[in-house]
C-alpha cells in the first residue's frame, strides 16, 4: 500500500517518451573570436526563455521539459563559458545554466529549422559586455524569449507547449535505414598526373585503382551506395569533385591521394580533415553567396537575414567537421593495424577539396610516391586492398548503429 502510494507520487514517473517530450541530442559550445556559441540539438521546435544572473555571472535558458540524450557529449568550457549544467528544473520546465567567465551580452538567440540530416537547433551567441550594462539587465524579470514560467503559474507549466510543424522548406530527415552514400574521389586525373614516382608511376593511376577497390569492397557489404567523382582518366576541378558528392547527397566524402615530398625518406599514411581556420573563412564566403548557400544546406535561405544565413552555413560546416574528425580517428585506428602511419597521422589542412560545408570530408594520403618503399607497395593490388579493407572497417565503425544513435 505504502509502496504503491510512493510510486504514484514519484516525480517524472510518467515515461518521457510517452509524454511526447522533445529530445535534446547534443549540446555544444563553439569559441569564435568575437563570440561564444551554444548549440542545443532538438528533435522538435520549442519555445525558450533567457535571463541572466550576477555573482556568479550566469545565463539561464528555460525550455519545455526535455528528454536529455546529451550524455557524455556535454561540453566543458569555451570562450565566455566556464561550464554548462542542464536538467529538469521543475515539471514542464527544463533548464540550462551556463556559468559565465564574465558579463555577457546575448547577441543572437533562436531556434533554427531542421534541414536534411540535422535536427532543430537552439543557437545562443554570447559576446563580452560591460559590467555596468550587465548589472542593468540581470534577473528573471528581464527574461527574453517566449518560454517563461512565473512562480504563480507553475501548474500551467505542466502543459507542454504545442509542437510546431517544421517549416515547409525543410527537407525530410534522411531515412536512417537507407544505405549510406559514400563519394570516393580519386585524386588528380587527365592532364594532371599528380605526383610521379621514382619508378615512373603516376599518382592518378594509383588513386583510381584504389578508389575502384574501395568501391567494390563497400558495395560488397550491401550497406553502401558508392559514387566515384571520376571513373576514368579525366581532369576534374576541386569544386567539381565537391559538387558531385553534394549532388549525390553523400554522407561522406573520401579523397584518395599518394603525393610526393622533397624528403624521399618520408613514408607512411596520413588522414587529413579541414582545419578550423579554413572553415571559418569558407563559411563566411558561402554565406555571402546567397544562391550558393541555398542549395548547400537544403533550405531556402533567401528569406533569411544575412546573419541567419551565416550561422546556418557555419553550423553545417562545423557539424561536418566534427563528423569528419570522428571518421578520421576511426580510419586511423583501422589503418594502423595494417601499416605504419606517419607521426601525427591525423592532420588538418586547408585542402579545397575538403571544404564542402555539408558533407563530412576526409583526405587519405595513402603514402608518398617520392619514397621508394611506398611506391613499390602502392603499385601492388594486394597492398592497396589491405588499406581499402581497413577504410571499409573505419566507415563501418563510423556508421555503426551505436554511433548514429548518439548522433540521433
Ligand atoms: Zn595528390
Image: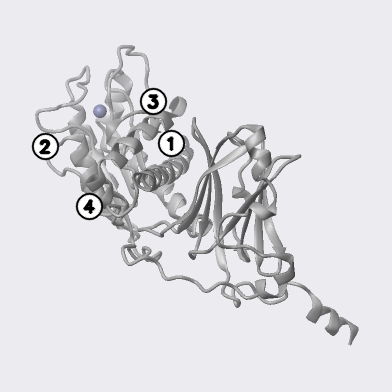
Residue 331 sits in which quadrant?
top left
Q: Is mark 3 within 8 Å of ligand 1?
A: no
In the rendered structure, are the residues bearing label 1 and label 3 in contact, judged by CB atoms less than 8 Å apart? no
176 on left or right of 209: right
Q: Nearer the viewer, mark 1 or mark 3?
A: 3
Sequence order check: which comes first, mark 1 or mark 3? 3
Which one is closest to the eye, mark 4 or mark 1?
4
Closer-to-camera residue (319/53):
53
- Whether residue 29 is situated above or below residue 402 in the rendered picture: above
Residue holding disc 2: 233
Mark 2 or mark 3: whose residue is earlier in sequence: 2
Callout 3: SS: loop
Q: Badge 1 is on which residue?
A: 338
Badge 2 crowding class, 10 Å Cα cut-off, few under 14, some 14 to 19, many 20 or more, is: some
Quarter holding residue 253: top left
Please state which of residues 352 and 81 is positioned toward the viewer in this rendering: 81
Residue to which mark 3 is pinned? 268
Q: Residues within 10 Å of mark 4 (few under 14, many from 20)?
A: few
Q: Report the residue at 45% width, 37% height from top.
A: 332
Task: Mark 3 or mark 4: name the one nearer the start of the chain.
Answer: 4
Image spot of residue 127 (x, y percent): 55, 36
CB under 8 Å between callouts 3 and 4? no
Distance of mark 1 from mark 2, alpha carbons? 29 Å
Q: Which mark is residue 247?
A: 4
Amino acid at each position: 500500500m505504502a509502496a504503491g502510494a510512493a510510486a504514484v507520487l514519484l516525480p517524472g514517473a510518467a515515461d518521457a517518451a510517452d509524454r511526447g517530450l522533445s529530445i535534446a541530442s547534443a549540446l555544444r559550445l563553439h569559441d569564435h573570436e568575437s563570440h561564444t556559441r551554444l548549440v542545443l540539438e532538438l528533435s522538435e521546435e520549442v519555445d525558450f526563455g533567457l535571463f541572466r544572473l550576477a555573482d556568479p555571472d550566469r545565463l539561464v535558458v528555460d525550455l519545455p521539459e526535455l528528454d536529455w540524450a546529451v550524455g557524455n557529449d556535454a561540453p566543458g568550457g569555451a570562450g565566455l563559458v566556464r561550464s554548462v549544467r542542464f536538467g529538469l528544473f521543475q515539471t514542464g520546465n527544463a533548464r540550462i545554466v551556463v556559468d559565465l567567465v564574465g558579463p555577457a551580452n546575448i547577441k543572437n538567440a533562436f531556434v533554427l529549422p531542421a534541414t536534411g540530416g540535422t535536427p532543430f537547433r537552439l543557437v545562443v551567441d554570447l559576446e563580452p559586455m560591460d559590467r555596468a550594462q550587465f548589472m542593468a539587465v540581470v534577473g528573471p524579470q528581464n527574461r527574453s524569449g517566449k518560454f517563461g514560467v512565473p512562480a504563480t503559474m507553475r501548474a500551467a507549466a505542466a502543459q507542454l507547449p504545442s509542437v510546431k510543424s517544421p517549416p515547409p522548406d525543410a527537407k525530410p530527415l534522411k531515412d536512417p535505414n537507407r544505405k549510406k552514400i559514400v563519394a570516393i574521389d580519386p585524386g588528380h586525373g587527365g592532364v594532371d598526373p599528380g605526383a610521379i614516382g621514382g619508378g615512373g608511376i603516376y599518382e592518378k593511376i594509383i588513386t583510381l585503382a584504389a578508389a575502384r577497390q574501395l568501391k567494390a569492397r563497400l558495395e560488397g557489404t550491401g550497406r553502401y551506395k558508392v559514387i566515384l567523382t571520376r571513373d576514368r582518366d579525366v581532369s576534374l576541378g576541386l569544386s567539381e569533385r565537391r559538387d558531385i558528392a553534394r549532388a549525390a547527397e553523400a554522407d561522406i566524402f573520401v579523397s584518395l591521394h599518394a603525393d610526393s615530398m622533397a624528403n624521399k625518406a618520408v613514408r607512411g599514411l596520413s588522414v587529413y580533415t579541414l582545419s578550423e581556420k579554413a572553415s571559418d573563412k569558407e563559411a563566411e564566403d558561402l554565406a555571402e553567396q546567397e544562391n550558393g548557400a541555398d542549395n548547400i544546406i537544403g533550405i531556402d535561405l533567401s528569406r533569411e537575414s544575412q546573419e541567419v544565413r551565416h550561422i546556418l552555413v557555419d553550423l553545417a560546416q562545423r557539424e561536418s567537421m566534427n563528423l569528419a574528425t570522428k571518421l578520421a580517428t576511426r580510419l586511423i585506428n583501422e589503418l594502423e593495424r595494417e601499416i605504419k602511419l606517419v607521426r601525427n597521422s591525423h592532420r588538418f589542412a586547408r585542402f579545397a577539396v575538403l571544404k564542402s560545408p555539408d558533407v563530412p570530408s576526409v583526405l587519405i594520403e595513402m603514402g608518398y610516391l617520392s619514397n621508394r618503399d611506398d611506391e613499390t607497395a602502392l603499385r601492388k593490388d594486394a597492398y592497396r586492398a589491405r588499406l581499402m579493407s581497413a577504410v571499409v572497417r573505419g566507415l563501418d565503425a563510423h556508421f555503426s548503429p551505436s554511433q548514429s544513435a548518439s548522433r540521433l
